[in-house]
Image (spheres, rainbow, N blue to C red):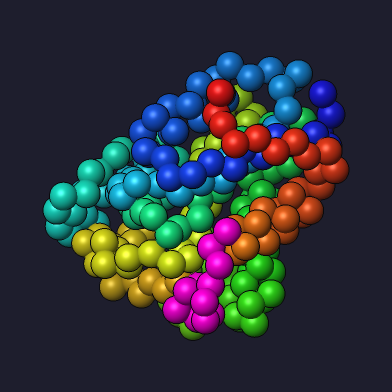
Amino acid sequence: MTSSQLIVRELDLQPYEPTWHKMQQFTNERDETDADEIWSLQHEPVFTQGQAGKAEHLLGTGDIPVVQVDRGGQVTYHGPGQAIIYLLLNLKRKKMGVRELVTIMEDAIVDTLAEYQVNAYAKPDAPGVYVDNSKIASLGLRVRRGCSFHGLALNLSMDLEPFLRINPCGYAGMAMTQLGMLVDDLDQVDATQRLLTNLISKLGYSEVTRLNTLD
């Protein structure tokens, strides 16, 4: 297995916890013969609280479940209309550090939004991608045995109200935005494909196999 080979799993709407546990299982069981994988999907409504998460950032979650997870960062929200991309990569094999991977993720999002004439940027002190001081994408990773999992969430056309029930990523009053508010008649599938294309290119994969199942 070479570092140029990649499996991309393009899925539909998925419940959070089973998907998370499958990421953990894949990472725990993989070896040097396994290709890297990227999972592209959307999630049913859920708040996820990172390892450093503080209960004070949960303001009033209501009927949406809260899941304590093993990624970095604070609390965020996932729901339909948000592109989720999980990066299950053997960083040791790729000779890539976490900071480099974070930069690639941010740059891929910024370049994708630029294709829609949206000027976006990353902040060195607050991981994620922003447009006019509003957050449009969140990042969160975990590295185990030299391999990454979790990934990024880009707001496309979703209900942003649940973000008001938390301090997004631990920032009180953090304004959230989404691409559908900045682009007329946004095609979510097209936007996700553009993001995947930019990510795969920046990560340097040349042999890509696409599947539509986790089995």
Q: Residue at x 43, y 27 (%)?
A: 21
Q: If the image is split into quadrants, where does the N terminus sit?
A: top right
Nearer to the camera, 58 or 125? 58
Nearer to the camera, 35 or 71? 35
Nearer to the camera, 24 or 191? 191
Q: Quadrant of residue 213?
A: top right
Q: Does the segment drawn in magenta span residue 102?
A: no
Residue 20 versus residue 179 in the image, above or below: above
Residue 13 versus residue 132 in the image, above or below: above
- Tell me residue 67's x, y (percent): 29, 39
Q: Residue at x 85, y 43 (%)?
A: 206
Residue 109 versus residue 15 in the image, above or below: below
Relative horizontal placement of residue 97, taking residue 140 as reference (left or right): right
- Tell me residue 80's x, y (percent): 39, 55
- Tell me residue 189's x, y (percent): 57, 59
Relative horizontal placement of residue 133, taking residue 174 as reference (left or right): right
Q: If the image is split into quadrants, where does the C terminus sit?
A: top right
- Tell me residue 191's x, y (percent): 60, 64
Relative horizontal placement of residue 143, taking residue 172 as reference (left or right): right
Relative horizontal placement of residue 19, taking residue 97 as reference (left or right): left
Q: Residue at x 72, y 58 (%)?
A: 198
Q: Does the segment drawn in magenta span residue 188?
A: yes
Nearer to the camera, 91 or 37? 37
Q: Which residues are magenta?
A: 179-189
Q: Quadrant of residue 4?
A: top right
Q: Residue at x 26, y 61 (%)?
A: 162
Examine the rendering and report whether any part of residue 215 can be seen.
Answer: yes
